[in-house]
Amino acid sequence: MEVNKFTISEWLKKLQSQICNALENADELSKFISEEWERDEGGGGKTNIISNGNVIEKGGVLYSAVYGKTPDFLKTEKQHTIIGAETSDTEFYATGISIVIHPKSPMVPIIHMNVRYFEMSNGTKWLGGGIDLTPHYINTKDASFFHTELKKVCDKHNLNYYQKFKNWADDYFFIKHRSETRGIGGIFFDRLTSDETMTFSQNLNFWKDIGSAFAPIYVELIQRNKQKHYTEAQKQWQLLRRGRYVEFNLIYDKGTKFGLETNGRVESILMSLPSNASWQYNFQPKAASEEFHTLSLLKKGINWL
């Protein structure tokens, strides 16, 4: 079958459905509500939202495929600039899935995944994505499981990818003004095309495997942690950590930036924010507490394997 933007978009639609089915089965109560939307400038998407479940307090699995004139910020801002986008008549096509799950229990981690494809009318095309985990309380066994599973997927395609993309995730999912990572990282990659070691087709297969790995990894983490007891104090800590998540997504996240700059659907873009979060002035966890331990591990460069 020919690989093009349309076949890639169709694959993403199927992935969205598969992931939603897996999450519904894991939650055992709540079901996704779907809403299709259209973008005035071209394209649209399908937003699937789940809330008030046994496990998931709020989450979304979003599909989009948007197109039109290349936005100015892709031509002018250094961190976004695409070679060849300088001319005014270029057009773009971007499709992808974005997922954020905020669990009810502070013992179950927040998870995020994004896989996306971008192409321009001048022939430029690339793949991007990543998956990262944000535990409210870091469990080193869970962290090892998470990173080991990602490494398995990477190693299947390129033995250099895990460490390269793990380092990239450490740098990307970093809250600079707090000098801490958002969680335990994962992998992150962008502008992936072809080079002397990998063809575009090979990278597309890697990209698909990352997308397909989401559900089994997160369902396993749900099963490990959903029955654990937690206190009201631990719930309050969860709200503080959610506050950090909000700070990152509104200040640094490129996906949020791209969606808002391209006149995407605001409700879908801001789905990544939790229902409730907290900011307590100058909160300092007690020494030797679980909260103190978690903060001590929110650093770049930790080997979780």
Image (cartoon, rainbow, N blue to C red):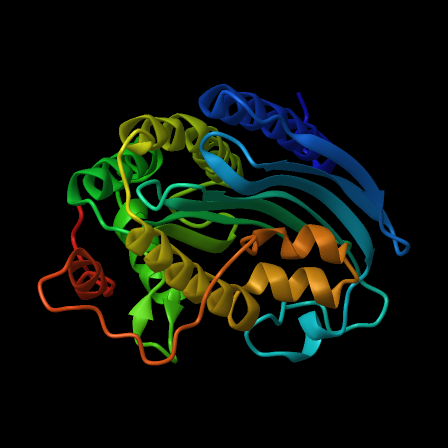
Residue 114, x across and y down, in percent: 53, 46
Count of numbered labels shown in the rendering = 0
94 or 158, which lies in front? 94
Among the 4 quarters of the image, the one containing residue 60: top right
Decide if residue 297 is on the left or right side of residue 263: left
Q: Position of residue 206 (x, y in %)?
A: 44, 35
Residue 216 in the image: state x and y as whole percent: 39, 25
With respect to residue 146, does 73 lie above or below?
below
Q: Residue at x 49, y 36 (%)?
A: 56
Work out whether residue 172 or residue 235 is closer to the camera in this orientation and state it. 235
Quadrant of the rendered structure where residue 262 is? Answer: bottom right
- Image point (89%, 56%), residue name: 41
Q: Position of residue 23 (x, y in %)?
A: 50, 27
Which is more toward the observer, 235 or 209?
235
Q: Residue furthest left?
A: 288
The quarter holding residue 13 reads top right
Residue 145 horizontal side relative to residue 11, left or right = left
Quadrant where the N terminus lies? top right
| Residue 169 appearing in the image | no
Q: Is residue 243 visible?
A: yes
Residue most extreme to the front? 232
Q: Residue at x 36, y 52 (%)?
A: 235
